[in-house]
Amino acid sequence: MYGKSPARLVPLLLGLQLTALWPTTAVEIYTSGAVEAMNGTDTRLKCTFSSFAPVGDALTVTWNFRPRDGGPEQFVFYYHVDPFPPMSGRFKDRVVWDGNPERYDVSILLWKLQFDDNGTYTCQVKNPPDVDGLVGTVRLSVVHTVQFSEIYFLALAIGSACALMVIIVIVVVLFQHFRKKRWAERAHKVVEIKSKEEERLNQEKETRFSRTRTLDT
């Protein structure tokens, strides 16, 4: 009896070891963190994920919203095989699916922003057997005017430099064009002057020749 006990414990211990070595699967969520957009415009709430399991029909995505000034959590969007926008509430006819599960993108597009859209948007992804993981959050700030970041200033500086280079090139080309035109006009005038001078000399020669013939006669 006691000789069989170790043999029975081997499968149990092996199963525990395999469980300990098997990697813990969990969906990882990536968002833009904070988004600033102007009132009345549209904005994209970006959310991507990674999962050990292949993406299939079991994938579900849930977007919720919690106002900045407090209050209960509100439903925004749901996806399972097909997108399911809200049929009522503040986000009705204002949110559309803008993701691609094959690329691990579950983003949404929010239309016609309002100031009361300020708050935190949560993105939860379940891809069985990966059903655990942190919920992604996006903090949206709706403002009158968008504040320019360093990237915008850099883009503006690069654009201004490119525009300046284009203007300089145009000025140089025009300068060379008018310079060539001026030289051509001067050359034409010189030719005209020489032609008139030669014509005058020829007329004087003809006049002298005529006078000489008259005197000889």
Image (tube, grey):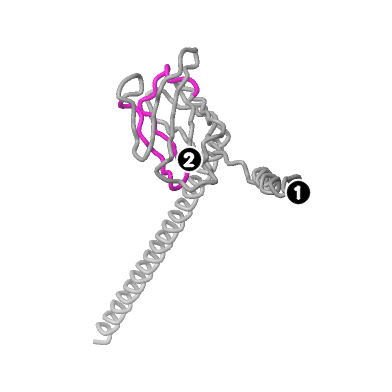
Residue topped by disc 1: 3
Q: Give the range drawn in magenta.
A: 93-120
Quadrant containing the N terminus in the rendered view: top right
Which disc, if any, is residue 127? 2
Q: Which amino acid does label 2 sit on?
A: Asn
Q: Is residue 87 left or right of residue 183?
A: left
Q: In which quarter of the image is residue 202?
A: bottom left
SS state under label 1: loop
SS state under label 2: loop
Q: Is residue 134 above or below residue 73?
A: below
The percent position of residue 57, horizontal first and vertical second, equals 39, 43
The percent position of residue 194, horizontal first and vertical second, equals 38, 70
Q: In this view, does 58 lie to the left or right of 199?
A: right
The percent position of residue 189, horizontal first and vertical second, equals 37, 64
Q: Residue at the location (41% across, 66% down)?
A: 187
Label 2 and label 1: CA atoms lie apart by 46 Å
Q: Which amino acid does label 1 sit on?
A: Gly
Q: In this view, does 123 lie to the left or right of 204?
A: right
The verdict on residue 115 being magenta is yes
Q: Foreground residue, 38 or 136?
A: 136
Q: Residue at the location (50% across, 45% down)?
A: 164
**Does the residue at mark 2 contact the one at mark 1 (Cβ under 8 Å)?**
no
The percent position of residue 191, horizontal first and vertical second, equals 37, 69
Q: Is residue 11 left or right of residue 75?
A: right
Q: Residue at the location (72% across, 48% down)?
A: 4
Farthest bottom residue?
216
Q: Foreground residue, 94 or 105?
A: 105
Q: Residue at the location (45% across, 27% down)?
A: 37
The verdict on residue 35 being magenta is no
Q: Is residue 155 above or below residue 63?
A: below
